[in-house]
Image (cartoon, helix red, strand yellow):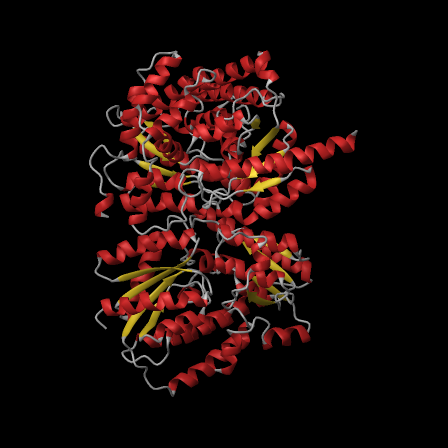
Amino acid sequence: MENTKMLPNEGLFDRVYGLFEILKKLPPQLSEDELEGLLKVLPPDSANSMQALLKPSIQQASLTFLSMLTTALEETRNAKKNGKKVILVPFNFPPEIVHAFDNLAPITTEVLTTLGVVALEGQGERYWEYAMGLGLPDHLCSANTIDLGSTLTGIDFDPDAIISGCVGSCDVNSKTHEFVSALLGLPQIPLEKPTDDTARGFEFFKKNYYKMISQLEKLAGEELKEENLRVVAEKANRCTELYYDIWEMKKQVPCPVPGIFSLFVCASRFSMWGRDEAIRTLEDCLQVAIRNYESEEYRDRGEVARVVWIYLSYYFDFVNFYDWMENKRISNMGDALQLAFPEPLDLSTRESILDGMIKSAWNNVMTRQMGAYSMSAQWVEDIIHVIKEFDVNGAIYCGHHSCKQTWSIFSIARSEVLKRTGVPTLGLQGDSWMKNMTPIGVIQEEIEQFVNNVVIKKRGRRRRKKS
Amino acid sequence: MDELNELVSVIENTYVRKAREEGQKIVGYACLSTPREIFDAAGIFPYRIKALSNTETEMADAHLSRFNCGFCRSCLQLGLDGTYDFLDGLVETNGCDHLRGMFENWQYVTPRSFFHYLRVPHLTDEDSMEWFRGELEMLVEALEKHFDVIINEENLQASIKTQDQITEKLRHIYESRWEKEIKVPGSEIMALTVAEGSMPPADYSRLLDEYLEVIRKRKPLKTRARIFMGGAATDEVELITALEELGGIMVADSFCFGGRLFRRKSSADDTLLRLVEMYLNNLLCPRMFMDYESRKSFIKDMIQKSGAEGAVLFHNKFCDLHGIENVQIRLDLEKEGMPVLLLEKEYGAEADIGRLKTRVQAFLERLKR
């Protein structure tokens, strides 16, 4: 443990916050020379991410996206000073309900981990190692463990409570959050979704959701106000509209929505849904997509394949993942983190808004698929929906080693998807947040072989058959 | 003892064969949260799915992955290779992510005409208890409908009574190790608890009576140290035997094929509510949330009463529930001065036993024994 001891301000949150303080000072538009200069002063891991994020073609959306995350970090950082309490939430918990409280600020574990991986030199592995030093097993989820490892050091920001939103849909996520809650003595608010897709299951979930609201009210020292709820709900509805506008744009050939935007959309969903910052991010993503769609140059580049990631993808090397796929003209149609299927909230009454929010939580990513009566059946349905919507011709499972639920039914998903759509699925193995598990070069090679030898050939055969 | 040996080494044992010959229905279940009384009341033989250290998993590995726990892969293998063909039905529970995957694959590859999903909540608040009661009602209904049987108050009460008697006998045998002189090794206790799910309750009750007679005549064992063991879902009697050969006797445990089996208690008058309290409230499984304190108290109580000098906590590779919980338990026990050894293992792997023995040997030396 001595080797992993950290000094004050060396926690993941503090370091990420420090970097975002600098990014905040960037001008609204960065010239190529300025970008080149910036990349030279950044450490290599951070420079890699910024190179992908700030390239001219997507810079407008990226800067808005970074600004959204800066706001989330600032609100967490200044929560105590502003008399607010910080609620740590997992990615599958829709945060808009927390935004509706005056005295609460949500921050998402997996978003923090991703920021650590993207922004910090060493990509947050030191926090993973700290957790391992406690004796935790190495088959945990890096998406939780990197940030929570930092929280466990006791030198980083400390949340006031944890919402455990994965009870019933992911053991490792819910259990890791429970561990942190027990070790740091933080209140834990469990939100269980029963594995029952009927009205009975929904009623049980609704009761659990209302119990969670009561607990949040106690923590916040305030009642959930209808006017706040309404403001958040109206903005959440705008986010939903934009989400489906971007979704529609993805149907175009070649896909005009850059692959990295799936990350922007998900991060918005997971952290600032129901807030102006998320609206601005989604609006800028849409604008860039429309611009691409209207650009002759973009259309002329064509695409060799349309690939969807059926669960997670890789988030540790933007240049060699998103940009590389783009350069290979493989359209990245996003990953399963987009499978949240938000619906417009009925703004008639407090109850109708809450009913809609409960439904959003029920249908949110992972909760919906892995918390279903049958994990494989719901997951397969959703994958097939995306394949049909986006006319996908290749599916990839990234094989994040911690996803025991999806790993346990991957063979069913692969064979059902092939049987019902004819689309082949590549199964990879690699940690989504840690580069050491499978080098990105190996991942690139496997994707390329799959696209060239399976997807393209299969498509050729289908075309020949049709003609 | 021969009978016990057969029960922990053969899946399709004498009782299974006898039940088949007599036309009795047999339903498989895997999780401790499944009330055996309900099946027994219907005249159905409840068989707890286990793998008995089976290490061949090539068929299962084509469906589950190497990132899933070895115990579930081994059980699935036996489901796919025909070993469990004697089962007339399966009851799935959402015990953990691996277990759910195991059942989904089993049912996907070799569908059973009776397949019921008992959805066990992860909390024990009032709503969750009510939910589970509803689940038990649905289980009763499904069994009645499919097998054309009647499960009424009378036969359910009779089954509960039999199970209560079993619990008392088992408790008596189990706690005999807490005396100064130990006559029963922990591996034999595990064999007994594994056998519980391999035979009809009435036969098991008789086996316990016979076993009580056998151990009465036993001489005390040579004991180097008294050890508490806990953690993973495991039915590996050979593993415990191999570790006890080093002299550290397992005097108490928190395995779900072990000490957790007979901690069920309830004073409710309503029959189904009684089962709810017995099976959900006392599950003591790390899958449950907001219940860590109960599990910790249970373990501390077992350690104190058994006079254990050290604790060995296992988890099967890729089992997140036990892998995380064990660290938490270790930190809490160590705070109170109890030496703890954490061991990650592959299910049923003989090749792993040498490594585990070395670690346990070193642990015994650490205990200055």
Give A277 or A134, whichever is nearer the viewer. A134
Q: Residue A159: horizontal and vertical position, in percent?
A: 30, 35
Q: Residue B127: horizontal and vertical position, in percent?
A: 46, 46
Residue B61 showing in the rendered view:
yes
User: In this view, which residue lies farthest toward the right?
Assistant: A467
Q: Residue B30: horizontal and vertical position, in percent?
A: 53, 60
Quarter holding the C terminus of chain B?
Answer: bottom left
Residue placed at 33% from the left, 19% from the top? A38
- Relative to A344, say whether B325 is above or below: below
Residue placed at 64% from the left, 40% from the top? A417
Q: Is residue A463 left or right of residue B137?
A: right
- Relative to A23, say whether B121 is above or below: below
Give B31 or A223, whichever is nearer the viewer. B31
Residue placed at 53% from the left, 61% from the top? B74
Within the image, what quadrant is residue A125 found in? top left
Q: How many marks?
A: 0
Q: Residue B13: horizontal and vertical position, in percent?
A: 58, 75
User: In this view, which residue lies farthest toward the bottom?
Assistant: B217
Give A99 or A143, whichever is nearer the viewer. A143
Residue B31 showing in the rendered view:
no
